Amino acid sequence: MKINIQKRFYESLTEPPRRDGKIHVSHLIHKCLRRSYYGIKLGEDFLHTKTLLTFWLGKKVHEIPVLAEHELKLEWNGIVGTVDEYENGLIVEKKTTVWDVEQPMGHHKMQLYFYAVMLLKNNKEVNEMKIMYIDINKKDLKVFDVTVPDLKFYERMMTKRKEILSQCLDGNILPINFPSWMCKYCPFGSLCFRDKNV
């Protein structure tokens, strides 16, 4: 029996959809909750193999520890998340990229803000934030400082988004979409534009 190595590799990249009944921080960082809705309902199997390969490279980068607490798992208010790196009040988020990054992206900063809220709720201080961009094409590394904002504001935002997404998931109601430049990179873009906006 002949083994298809490429098929086996791509199969190993896919994970079963998250069915733990919890909302993950990554589901809340985009303004468009429809993207998160599709991701939860359809799972990673729906994604294109190029996207899966990109995710796999990102996972490999995330396996490298940088600070004392690596891949720190947190939970608060039915929301779960994994902080890439944490030590003595410093949060570091690692991102792989294929283009030159001049400044941190908004949804990446949002992820840091939401993690900061969760850290505080888990009795861990937050006084410094950084995003590390690893360019997998140029083999380059950039680290940006991110100012710690008013976290009460982001706690309210995070809670509200979680409530809306939970209600949509429970009722099988498609969330309103928010078309933007990010639609070009959304794995569910073609499906989204076929579905009716509510």
Image: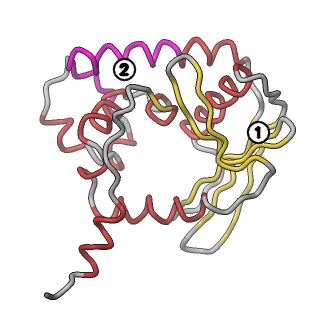
Quarter placement of the N terminus: bottom left
Q: Residue at x 37, y 29 (%)?
A: 32
> Farthest residue toward the right?
88
Label annotation for residue 129:
1
Secondary structure under the numbered disc 2 in the rendered image: helix
Q: Which SS does the magenta portion mostly show?
A: helix
Image coordinates for residue 183, horizontal then vertical, percent: 33, 42
Q: Which residues are magenta?
A: 159-179
Q: Earlier in the sequence, mark 2 or mark 1?
A: 1
Q: Residue 160 lies in magenta, yes or no?
A: yes
Which of the pair 120/187 is nearer the observer? Answer: 120
Q: Residue 98 lies in magenta, yes or no?
A: no
Say what amino acid the circle numbered 2 marks.
Leu
Image coordinates for residue 195, horizontal then vertical, percent: 14, 31
Quarter placement of the C terminus: top left
Give the tally of numbered discs: 2
Label annotation for residue 165:
2
Which of the pair 16/113 is nearer the observer? Answer: 16
Image-quadrant location for residue 114 = top right
Q: Is residue 138 left or right of residue 90?
A: left
Say what amino acid the circle numbered 1 marks.
Met
Q: Is residue 186 above or below residue 59?
A: above
